[in-house]
Structures are given as structure tokens and as C-alpha cells.
Amino acid sequence: MSMAINIPKKESSRNFFDELTYFQSIALLLFILSAIGFVVFKDFLFLEKLYLFKGIGSDTVNSKYPLMVHVSSYLQEFGIPTWSFNQGMGQNILPARMKNPLYWFVYLSSPDSVGYKIVYVEYVKIILSGLFFFLYLNAMKVRNYPAVVGAMIYGFTGYMILGGGWYNYSGTVMFVALLLYAFELLFMKNKWYLFPLAVFFLADSRLYFFGMFLFLYSIFRFLDVYGFELREYCKLFVKMLGCSLLGVLLSLPFFVPLVLRILNSPRVSGDASQVNNLLERPVFGLESAHHYLTVIMRMFSNDILGSGMQFKGWYNYLEAPIFYCGLLVLLLVPQMFVFLKGRKKLLYAVFIGLWVLMIVFPYFRYAYSLFTGDYYKTALSYIFPFTLIFVGVHALNKIDELKKINVNVLVISLIVLLIFLNTNYSFEARQDLFVFLEDIVNKKIQLFATLFLIGYAGLILMFKYQRVRAFAQVGVFILLSVELGYFSYVTVNGKDAVSSEEYESRVGYRDYTMDALSSIKAKDKSFYRIDKGYSSGPAIHGSMNDALVQGFYGTPSYRAMNQGNYIHFLQELNVIEKGNVSHAKWAPGLARPLLKTFGSVKYYLSNQEDTHPFIKSTYHFIGQFHDVHAYENKYFLPLGFTYKKYIPKDKFDLLSSSRKDVALLSAFVIDDVSAAENLGLSSYDLNRLPEYFNLDNYRDSINALKKDVLNITFHGQKSIEGDIELQDSKMLFFSIPYDVGWKALVDGEDVKLEKVNIGFSGLYLPSGKHSVKLYYEIPYNSVFVSFSIIAGLLYLWLIFIARKKSQSQSQSQVLVLAT
């Protein structure tokens, strides 16, 4: 008789997430990122609304969208965009985000469809950012489950979702994830090929900020893995430097024009620079209580202190700290220090503390940005959340692997977070007013954040117990999906977006301005500028970039880095205030009547019948197009008029604003008078300026300047051709902001363009008949393109050599095994 013995089955330690393969994990991640993104962007993806915002996100309407429309049109007519007369009075607009391949989906479409396609670019950025971050975590040998969780969080950080409402910052999130992945491949596997490509995409105004970040991060990672081995780190650093140099060389045709524009900008090298002001701040000076409360609260949600225009935190909705990176991370970071021992605990504390130092003491934040501004949005709103995600994901990786959790630390962390989240703080917002946090916190978000934190704490606790570990993993995954989806939905849909009906109707940029422009362009093919007495943009902030969207040459310009010489002119003419950063960005253009004539403004559009005496006496009415009234300047000066006399700059500076305007219609302004004297030109007697400039004076001045003008036979964005016949030697003036990229040919010979009239371009011409050609080339562009091509060939050759070496090593290993 046999007796059966029941042996208990060993409880399996595997579950759904443990069984996932590498590719299955990627598939799951892509699905969940797409699903959450679909919920968040549903109204935009179905084109009920456009990803253009009229409130606090008005830069999308006033700056980003106009440039995209213009680039789309420019590509079709002139090729790669460089100089554009539609931006202010003209400037180089390259690179115009052309290095980002996703934007070509927008640029290569019809300009009319640009507004509809922007959201798809942002949607794809989220998915790719999450994917690159997963690959980065996997390269560090993080387990599949924590890697998927970390990638989900990364794809929906505040910097991605809130910053993505301004387009720039979501691209940063995506490409820095690619850079981090490339670094880990180089560091852990000695695979370098992706590193130059990642640097190529970031080789613009972000290069310094994230190059410095990567340098500090690489030191941290090396010490974390290998400890203090200076020689080995130096080898790694040399590899990074070489790959970075190759990436920059690949990027030169796009990188150099941007660098030149930045260096020539008044915000960097001119009167609007903040360097001296920020340098004088105390090193260990503190920010306001309002600032520190914003720092704390914005770790719980982008919108806990209000959305869009309702934001009640420090600074504004975008430029305040954007530190939201998932509530789960806030609970996990302290757990990491439980697993760390000795020097590693200190290392992690120092790495986090470095960024905390910049938050607590703003002087260090200024220093990181080279004292160019009081910025969070440029880098720190990315770096600090990334650091928390990095530490939190590694803590989850340890918990998931070791099935250990420090309950005391978890409970204390939860209590501290709940206290920060739910305490009613007070701070002095103004000298005479105390504001209570309970009055400005979004109570619904506060409640949800509280419930999420408690839910996460309970689920993390379950990771200790094998029987419920699988449930805990699924629970965290579901709860995290809900949290990211809900908070991101609030951020994206809490701003006032342009509806599809509004976009298609005769309001905004598609208003009746377009009818007036069509009529003017049909009858006048010459070079001229148009001034508008109204803004067509639909945002609460008036647009200064109507010309980019509506396709005309104007004079106002809103751009982070406006053309330096043009801004200098506006400052010297007292149109804008010297040293004012906002005025350097929001340039109103030629705001005074005589300056409009000086700048070849031929037409004026008004959204009402204009009864201003000056308009009535100097412009004549040419037509009405619904609510748009069009006028033509009777005293128009064409591009390419001539001066006989000059005014030394030092004497011009002594004039009042109104007399400066008159003087520019009498003689040109020059710093170095020797060249003008050598040509036989004489100085203008400023005593001849009329005390009261009347219409007779105006007409006489214009007639004198129009006596000899350039007969333009061709004009485009990058070149102008014409001929002129002079009885005497003169200065041929172009109201084109001076740029070393503009070259001149006179009678087929190279002639140097002069900087005249405080930032514009001119040619000294002797008497006689001349053919004149102006053409624009990015300075040293052929050299930079050549370097870029050589770098590209070198890049491909190095990849080929590396692959051959790898194949040779594989064959050698096979032979060894065979013998």
C-alpha cells in the first residue's frame, strides 16, 4: 500500500511585471504613454481646440505659431530660412527649430494647417521622451517595472506638460533624455555613436546649461559606480568631450547663427543685460517666503496654486519653479537613503543638495545661468525634478528587487508631506496685506494629492509582503496612471485655448487684414512696409508678430533675441527704454510718424476710420475691407534713398527725440566721418533744422531724399537688385538693420556696407550710373557647412570602423569557442 504525500507548492515569486521581457516592457510603456496622452489631449487631437493659448500661454499665439507659419511659407518660396523682412525690420531667423525633425511635419504642410498640427508634435514628444528615459534607465540596469514607472513619470513631469505649452521645453525634456541614454551607453558599454547625435540636437541656447548639468551628473555617476578613480574618469571625460565636439561640429550651420544672434542681442551684450544687477546681489541672500512656498507646493502639482492666469504663486505660471514630478517620487526619495551606506549616502545627499542650494540661495541660480537672468524655466525646473526621479526610481528598483521597505521612514515621509500639503501658511505678499495659503490653494487638487499620497504609501508598504506584491505593483501602476492623467489634464485644459471655430473664422490672424493685404499686393509689387494700428492676434497680450503670419513687411517684433542693431536704434531714438529687458523683447517698431517714413512704411491699416490730424494730412484713404481701413503714405520714402550730407553721431545724440526724427530726414548719422569726407560729402548744419516741422518742411525733406533713389528690379528675402544714376557722390541708404551677413556688389565689384543711422545699412557711391545688388549670406556659412559635412563623414566613418572592430571581435570569440 502506497501513501501519497502532499508536498506544498513553492510560492512563485514571479508575477506579470516580473515576466515582462524588455520589448514587452517597451510596448506596455508606449501603450500607457499614448493612452494617458490621448485622455489629456483628446480635444486637441480631435481638433476641437488648437494647441494655441490666449491667456498666460499667449507666447504660443504671439511668437511660436507666427514663426512656424512663416517658416512654412518661407520654405516653399525661398528655401532654408535665413534673413526675413517679416521679423521686425529684418533679421536672421535661422535655426527656427529646424534641427528638430518633428517640426518638419509642421513646416512641410500648408501654412494654413500649421495650427492644427502642433499638438501632434507635442503628443509625440511625450511618447519619445518616455521611451528615451526607459532606455536610459535600462542602460543603468534598472529592472523593467521601475523603469516603466520612471519613464511614465518622466513623460508627464511638469516641465514637459506645463512647459510643453510653450513648445520649447518639451523638446528639451525629449533631447536631454536622449543625451542621458547616450551617456549611459558610453559610460557603461563604451558605445559612443549616439552621443554626438544627442549633442547635435541640443547644440543651441541649451548647450551650456545641459552641458554643465551633464558634466556634474557624469561625476556623480562615476563616483556612484566606481568611486574616486581620477584617471579613469579623465578617460571618460575625454570621450565625452570628443563626442560633444563632433556633435557641435555637425550642428555648426544652425548653431553659429544662433550664437551670433545671442551675442549681438542687447539682453546679452547691450543695455538690457542683467549681469551687473544680478552680480551685485548678496551671495547668501534669500528669496521671499512666497517663493519658497511656491517651490514646496509646486512639487505636489503644477496647478495647486492656480492654473494659467489664475496662478497665485511666485513670479508667473511658467517662470515659477515647475517641480512636479509625481507624488510617488516624493515618498520614494527618502527610502533610497535607507539602502545607501557610508560615502554613497553622502554622494547622493551632495548631488541633491547642489540643486537645493540654487533654490535656497538665488545667487547660485544666477551664477548657473551666467547672471543672464533669474531663471527656473531654462534649466533648474528640469534638473531638480530629474534628480528626484533618478533617486526615486532607484529606490523603487531596490524595493522591487529586495522586497524591503523601511516602514518608519515611509510613515514619517508621508506625515511630513501631508503637513506641507495641508498646512495653512501665511506670508506677506505686500507690505500692507497678508495672504493665507488656504485662500489660494486649489482645494480639489489638494484633496486628490492627499489621497494619492496615502494610496501610494499603502501600496509601497505592500511590497514587503510576497503574497500581495503583485497587487501592489499593479496598484501603483494604475494609481500613477490616474495621477499623471488627472494632473496633466488640469494643466493642459486649464488654459484658454483657441477653438477650431475661432481659428477658421474671420477673427484673429485671419481677420479682414488679409483682404486689405491682398488688395495692396495685387496693385503694388514694390518693396514697402505696412503699419497697423491694431493687433490681429487673439491673445490677451497684443501680438507684435502679425507680419510673420499675415505675410507682410512691418516694423514691430516680439522675439527673445531681437536684432541687436535694430533694438539699439530704437533705444537711441527713445522709442524704447534703454536697459529695459521687456522692451528689448517687445519692440513696438517705428512708433512715430516721421520714423515710419524713414523706414519705408507705405501703407497704414486701421480697424476704424482714422481721424487723427496727422493721418488725415499725410495719408490718403485707399479702401475699406469690412472693418479694416487702408491708407497710403503721401510722403513715402522707398528702400534705397540717398543723402548728400551727414551728421556726426556725437552731435546727433544731443538732439531731442522729435528733432532726431527730423534730422534723419535731412542727413545720415555716422560715427566715423572720414569716409564721408573722402567722398566729398559735407556735414549738415543742425541749426538748419526747423524749430517747428510743418507739412511744407516735411514735403521738402522727402522730395530732396527722393531725388536719387534705387530703382529696384528685384527684391526677395535674401537679395535686392536695382540700378541708380547719381549726379553727385552720395550715401545710398537702406532701412535694413546692419548685419555682417549682408554683402553688396556695385557694378559687379564687392563693396563694403557701412553701418549708418545708428544701426542700419548704407553704401557710399560716387557719381554716375551704377548697378547695385545686396545679398544675404550667413557669415562664414560655407566654412561652417564644410566643417559640418566633414564632421558627418567622420561620424559615419567612425561608426563603420567601430562596427568592423565589433564584428572582428565576435568572429575571434567564435573561433576560440570552436577550438
Image: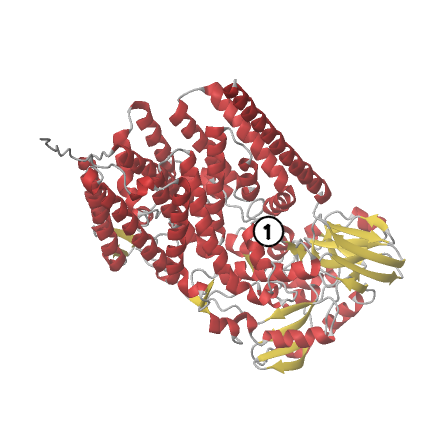
Q: What is the x, y in percent for residue 116?
A: 51, 64
What type is the residue that disc 1 sits on?
Answer: Met
Q: Is disc 1 placed on a helix, strand or loop? A: loop
In this rendering, the answer to whether 137 lies above or below 633 is: above
Does residue 557 show up?
Answer: no
Q: What is the x, y in percent for residue 268?
A: 56, 45
Q: Give the left or right position of residue 103, taking residue 705 as reference.
A: left
Quadrant of the image containing the N terminus: top left
- Which residue is more in the foreground, 175 or 575? 175
- Residue closest to the far top: 819
In this rendering, the answer to whether 478 lies above or below 791 is: below
The picture quadrant where one finds residue 226 is top left
Q: Give the left or right position of residue 480, taking residue 458 as reference.
A: right
Q: Give the left or right position of residue 743, taking residue 54 as reference.
A: right
Does residue 627 show up?
Answer: yes
Crowd around label 1: few <14 · some 14–19 · many ≥20 (10 Å)? some
In this rendering, the answer to whether 275 lies above or below 45 is: above
Q: What is the x, y in percent for residue 540?
A: 46, 66
Q: What is the x, y in percent for residue 510?
A: 56, 72
- Which residue is more in the foreground, 32 or 103? 32
Residue under circle 1?
98
Picture residue at 23% right of the left edge, 37% below the top: 12
Picture residue at 87% right of the left edge, 61% below the top: 726
